[in-house]
Image (cartoon, coloured by chain):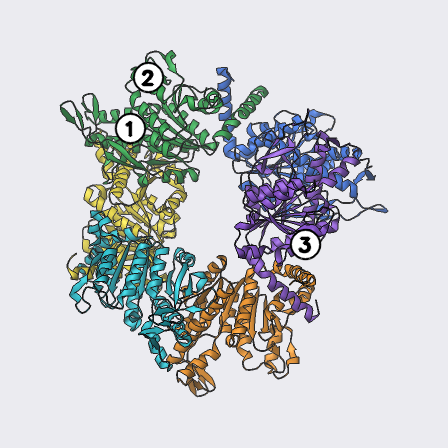
Chain colours: A orange, B cyan, C yellow, D green, E blue, F purple
Amino acid sequence: MNDPGDRTVAVTALKRAVPYIRLFKHKTFVIKAGGAVFAEPETMRALVEQVGILHQVGIRTVVVHGGGPQSTELAKALGLETQFVDGRRVTDDRALDVSAMVLNGMINTRLLAACRDLEVPAVGVSGIDAGLIRARRRPPVKTGERTVDYGHVGDIVSVDPSVLQKHLDAGLLPIVSPLSCDERGNLLNINADTVAAALAARLNAEKLILITGTPGILEDESDPASLVSYTDLSGLQRLRQQGCLAAGMLPKADAIAEALTGGVQRVHLISYKVPDSLLLEVFTNEGAGTLVVRDIAALSPAEQQGSE
Amino acid sequence: MNDPGDRTVAVTALKRAVPYIRLFKHKTFVIKAGGAVFAEPETMRALVEQVGILHQVGIRTVVVHGGGPQSTELAKALGLETQFVDGRRVTDDRALDVSAMVLNGMINTRLLAACRDLEVPAVGVSGIDAGLIRARRRPPVKTGERTVDYGHVGDIVSVDPSVLQKHLDAGLLPIVSPLSCDERGNLLNINADTVAAALAARLNAEKLILITGTPGILEDESDPASLVSYTDLSGLQRLRQQGCLAAGMLPKADAIAEALTGGVQRVHLISYKVPDSLLLEVFTNEGAGTLVVRDIAALSPAEQQGSE
Amino acid sequence: MNDPGDRTVAVTALKRAVPYIRLFKHKTFVIKAGGAVFAEPETMRALVEQVGILHQVGIRTVVVHGGGPQSTELAKALGLETQFVDGRRVTDDRALDVSAMVLNGMINTRLLAACRDLEVPAVGVSGIDAGLIRARRRPPVKTGERTVDYGHVGDIVSVDPSVLQKHLDAGLLPIVSPLSCDERGNLLNINADTVAAALAARLNAEKLILITGTPGILEDESDPASLVSYTDLSGLQRLRQQGCLAAGMLPKADAIAEALTGGVQRVHLISYKVPDSLLLEVFTNEGAGTLVVRDIAALSPAEQQGSE
Amino acid sequence: MNDPGDRTVAVTALKRAVPYIRLFKHKTFVIKAGGAVFAEPETMRALVEQVGILHQVGIRTVVVHGGGPQSTELAKALGLETQFVDGRRVTDDRALDVSAMVLNGMINTRLLAACRDLEVPAVGVSGIDAGLIRARRRPPVKTGERTVDYGHVGDIVSVDPSVLQKHLDAGLLPIVSPLSCDERGNLLNINADTVAAALAARLNAEKLILITGTPGILEDESDPASLVSYTDLSGLQRLRQQGCLAAGMLPKADAIAEALTGGVQRVHLISYKVPDSLLLEVFTNEGAGTLVVRDIAALSPAEQQGSE
Amino acid sequence: MNDPGDRTVAVTALKRAVPYIRLFKHKTFVIKAGGAVFAEPETMRALVEQVGILHQVGIRTVVVHGGGPQSTELAKALGLETQFVDGRRVTDDRALDVSAMVLNGMINTRLLAACRDLEVPAVGVSGIDAGLIRARRRPPVKTGERTVDYGHVGDIVSVDPSVLQKHLDAGLLPIVSPLSCDERGNLLNINADTVAAALAARLNAEKLILITGTPGILEDESDPASLVSYTDLSGLQRLRQQGCLAAGMLPKADAIAEALTGGVQRVHLISYKVPDSLLLEVFTNEGAGTLVVRDIAALSPAEQQGSE
Amino acid sequence: MNDPGDRTVAVTALKRAVPYIRLFKHKTFVIKAGGAVFAEPETMRALVEQVGILHQVGIRTVVVHGGGPQSTELAKALGLETQFVDGRRVTDDRALDVSAMVLNGMINTRLLAACRDLEVPAVGVSGIDAGLIRARRRPPVKTGERTVDYGHVGDIVSVDPSVLQKHLDAGLLPIVSPLSCDERGNLLNINADTVAAALAARLNAEKLILITGTPGILEDESDPASLVSYTDLSGLQRLRQQGCLAAGMLPKADAIAEALTGGVQRVHLISYKVPDSLLLEVFTNEGAGTLVVRDIAALSPAEQQGSE
């Protein structure tokens, strides 16, 4: 940055960021990043760099990660066959071991190591720690004539966020693995979006930001230009009824609804493929991806403007 | 316990335990359990039950675990060959992945799940969290004519125990994986005894308790009757010079020396094969296994008596 | 405890006690011991040993003591005649001096000395300290044609438990003398059961435990086999109406009702003559004596079971 | 105070007192009052009124009381004969009971009751509470050919003032009985001046004020005009050598020396027979009685002037 | 004070003041002093001496000052002409500069300097500091046919007393200048009585004391004997309707009403010309000047008596 | 910032600023701005905007201001003649009034108002508040044959920074006027650079930044190209001896030396005429103006590099 013009730009940019810093300081953001973000060291590092900046400017930041592709890969390496019933994955005993090793041992560990490298003071947590998540095994589902047991898959019973709050109060950034368990200590797989939404609600988060490989919610999955940039719960419901939501988007839509109903102000869907998408979303006037609020009509005109 | 005699025994036992509770309340114990302890669910559960009691009566308890046998097993399942140079294991990239998955993803996770089952409020931590352990890669070792690089193996540079202390202050029991990293976020394997000794020293622990499959230090490895029940640093040095210390005991002897020099009062070696050995050690007048202090001669007669 | 069998029993007993420790840790118990408990140094010492164990394992323990027999004895030694009107004791000026000397100067002092001996960190308090109890003199009672003034006898107006809470927070065990006074500093005698019940209610105590010389509430005072082991407020009322409650039990029944109505969960009556009765009551599955709850029917089946 | 002149005087007086309030606010005063002060309700009440004012204006005030005359009286009422050996009182078992009842049960209790009446938030404490005073029995003294055991009489081993400090921090005024005990819980009589001096030293008191029935230290016990108004440790030593100190003054002189050596700034001896002597001493320019400092020569001229 | 009689008077006076100290300790008083009080160094010093005593005995004291006469004087020295419209002052740009310099730079500064001299630990604050007062410019007023803009004059929108409370908690006495501003940082003049009343209400003050040059509210402005010594809100309204309130008293009457409606217990009007009037008001049985309460009829007889 | 290129620049700039945020977070900066900075609303506003950003990103920022030109101007408006003796200004009584009004009433007030506008939570403080600065009047100086009294000019005796620390802890930015006083409350003028240096030393500030109208220290006052960009105490001494320091720079050189000797790490001199000079200094790799450290030779190479 030796060029004086460069330096001026830098300082001007800082001045533009300050109103956002003031706005979000001491607020809580829950960032959920899917396993695809961790497929390459570069994309993982880019995520850590960005959440580190949020943390540095005083935003209470919690990261929740997935690990689907990595689990599939490890299962294959171990010669395990993933069982499917009616197209849905069944988590048997060995698949559960794989999940635990991937989520708590590989992804969470690598994220913490990247945080160390980038001087972000982070700490790893999973749903099992200190009663963070209390879950119960999902009962077998009756579909048509058959009863299907999807295995070690759980539903959240309650969340005790005190361990996260203590870390945040101590200036640490929690990196959360969604692995959870029931009261008898049986491990349970829970969808990472669901975990992130539940944590965001209990932490009264200002924002829940879901980072995936798609640019946001698309009206037509095959057409990036059909991006829905701003909607609310009833809009989401409409899209679902119109069949616009892709299969993978359905559980996300449920998580979004849960977060917003639980008190989170805004849910964002952005793509990790857009460079600096997280910082652009937070620190500039125009967001990227899709923004979902509870009820657009209930917002004041000023808030509506701020949302765009 | 319907038999009145039984109930009287129970209460008498409680009264006998109280002086030990008073003695150790608010003191810190670091318990290190080797991977063999986790080979069977029963022995892992027995450990958790016992550390849960220490925690419950007010002892600030930290557990450090290993995971050697499990790493070997997973490597085999993945078809990896463990490299050896001059008989010592080399941690290459894939072996490091295995370590991370086993230590942080399998053993630590299972221990936390067992804690949930037994209502012990525990939290998982590894050397990577919040700067707990700062390590550096061990430089290649010159042996004879060759220079051997043992791979991703680290030496501790510094310990920042504040994350552990915050958990202990919050009434949580930390379960520590020894996996660590350097300042650039490169993961490093460190011997779990070494990690436990370093933590014990920095936490000013009253006791470091090493739980293994042997009854303690034996003068003759093949003769359980040759157990050394009480010794000190110079005694340990003498045993080493006499060639009495088995190969596996040598790094333990180094860890013991480091803990005692660092200020830990007593180091115990006990076997997980003796039922309730940890509770017997802490709450009854006669310990089991081997007790090592810094300098027997420097103890007052009363302290010497208390040590026996 | 050199016998290995002995040691195993001790550790097994400890493990059995731990669920109770977990259950009652940080909860408040108010223990009231009548003057008879202090008639012999051995029984007083046995009480202190037991309350010291409750304190040691983390139960917030408050002891309230009486001193009736000792007052009678001192009055006799001083050549005072105790006045009775219609069979009830009248506290005249000199009798009040005797009460003060016995309660605050003899019993409380001896209890504190025994605590010092047994390393229980205790502190003496009376109803006069720091506004703990604000009382007023009981107005003369009209009985038939006469109006009888029972002298310096008080009724509790209000309780300010902050001095007790500060002591408990500081890790001290308060030993409370029931001697109280009115706003003008006139000393007043108040029944120790009444004081204990009022403190238990204001401290939101988990348990109020009344220790006397009888095994509990008896349906037939002369038949120990008629012990009522479990009842509630309406059961107590029934017993009273059936004339089953002995004269000395009537004020106790009032105190029990006041405690339960005031929010105390359980009131126990046990005998100091049963060795370790307090510990047996708290740390084993089967209590001794009588347990009174507010309303048996309102308890869940699990709670009812726990009560037996 | 209807007369306007009166009101002006009152306000003028308040203004004169304010520099002293500023000077002594948050400082600690230990006031020791001998048993004679409590012989009449009026003199006790006058003391409480004055210490209440010290407390009210923000001085951390601790009161230590004696109880000699009252003990003699109670012993007589109980038909006990006080034993003397070579003119010194022997505290046998029954005399010890009498001390406990008088100090902890009568004087302390009455003082607290008077505090309640005058709205002074006070709390009773004795040397036995919470390890305040740790003492040991004074060994038998060899005098000439005989060895005399003075019975249950103690010497202070150590003082733990934390219970007093917590009360002072909570805005409470501690009323301290000098009764103490050894580590085995054996009660011990200790001279109240000695206790007051030890507490003053450990609390870093600004002033130790000894209230007796004499106007201060007299060079000639029979001549009030021989009052020593200002002296220091060497002056005290000189008076002792000249035989000017009356028998009762000798232990006081020892206590004064201990307090000054232990860091107390000033020790005052004043008489309770002078109305408002305590307030006059603290809030006006000229004290009454005797003031003793460590070393007059070491004071600055300003300090010397302030002392007169 | 060498005369023993004098000393006795002093101590007696102190004893009479103590009940008031007990009554008002930890309570909040807001004292408003008009600019006339600062016209002479002696009257300013007398005020500081008196508020220093309130502060010293533990009353949480806040001083609000005016500065009217001094502003007029400075404007004249600068050759500015004060504009009047229909007899009301208009605050133009230069008049605002004068206000700022007089209020924040002259009066506030001199008061702090006098506090330093009298060892009163004070701190200067104005309505602009830390959001203490948020105001808005008073809109132009339509009077008859003309619309008059009184210039930089403000109305209070909200009060954030946290900066005052932090100072009070730290043992500091805040000296408040009424200068305020709007959200855009435009300075605004606000009547000091109005500011004092708003602060008193938000601080839940026990008393608001308005110090002026008149003895209180007079039924007949020209007759000091017509002083209203005790009234309430409806009495004040009656006086206003009867035209008894002088022009200068009208805004004071509004401020009094706002304070009482906002929860302040008592508002006093006293004259700085009566020596020690503030201390006489607070520490003696009979106040001076006028006392206004919300509703005399709603007070208990005891409170009514206390008011006289 | 609608142009995507713009947005990328903004985010890139933010990423570049983060290492500096991390470096300086929770550190203390003292910024001194001379009166010239406040001559125009634009330059004052630019200063407030920049210190607001420092504050916002977590730097504990203290601003000290001067007011020389404004004082000269007000004096002129009031028709006062500034006295000079041997070319040095004499602060007589009226000049002191002018200083107080300008510093505390005009500059400090306007700065706070600008902070309100820019949403910077600031609070005004002067050397008189709460004992912040204790000064004494500078004694008359003997120059040649005459003794000259420069009037109400002070030297700092001691600094009590607790009022600043409480504000900083509460998240407030203190704006400090250098006006001070002695123990008798006599106001005293002290050079603002001297005050800033003393505060920086007592606050253990990381940086003292002096903002003036010149680009830094010039070897030749008339040649901006002769800027000294990096020096230390001995370099400063050399420049002084070579006569390179302009008259106005001499007291600054003293203040710089005092700050560095007192423990401040770095002193910067920058010009308010360079846009965003403060932000450029703090958040970019190359500073502007002059940097002075204690001893260049004592810095590690890395630190030296960082300094350039």
Q: Which residue is mark 1?
A: D191
Q: Amino acid at mark 1?
A: Asn
Using the image as rendered, state which of residue A235 and residue D216 is in the foreground: D216
Does residue A98 lie above or below E63 as drawn?
Answer: below
Residue F277's label in the rendered image is: 3
Q: How many marks?
A: 3
Does residue F149 lie above or below C269 as drawn?
Answer: above
Which percent across, then down, holds residue F232? 59, 47
The outermost residue toward the bottom is: A145
Among the 4 quarters of the image, the one containing residue A265: bottom right
Q: Amino acid at mark 2?
A: Leu
Quadrant containing the N terminus of chain B is: bottom left
Distance of mark 3 from mark 1, alpha carbons?
A: 73 Å
- Of all chains, the one bearing label 3 is F
- Of all chains, the one bearing label 1 is D
Is D59 left, or right, of C18 in this rendering? right
Distance of mark 3 from mark 2, alpha carbons?
A: 76 Å
Using the image as rendered, state which of residue E53 and residue C235 is in the foreground: E53
Q: Amino acid at mark 3?
A: Ser
Is E254 left, or right, of D151 in this rendering? right
Q: Which residue is mark 2?
A: D239
The outermost residue toward the right is: E145
Contact, mark 3 vs mark 2 (Cβ under 8 Å):
no
Mark 3 is surrounded, within 10 Å at the Cα level, by few (under 14), some (14 to 19) or many (20 or more) other residues, namely many
- Can you tell which of label 3 and label 2 is closer to the viewer? 3
- Can you tell which of label 2 and label 1 is closer to the viewer? 2
Residue at 42% over, 24% down:
D298
- Can you tell which of label 3 and label 1 is closer to the viewer? 3
Using the image as rendered, state which of residue A299 and residue E225 is in the foreground: A299
Which percent across, then down, holds residue D132? 32, 38
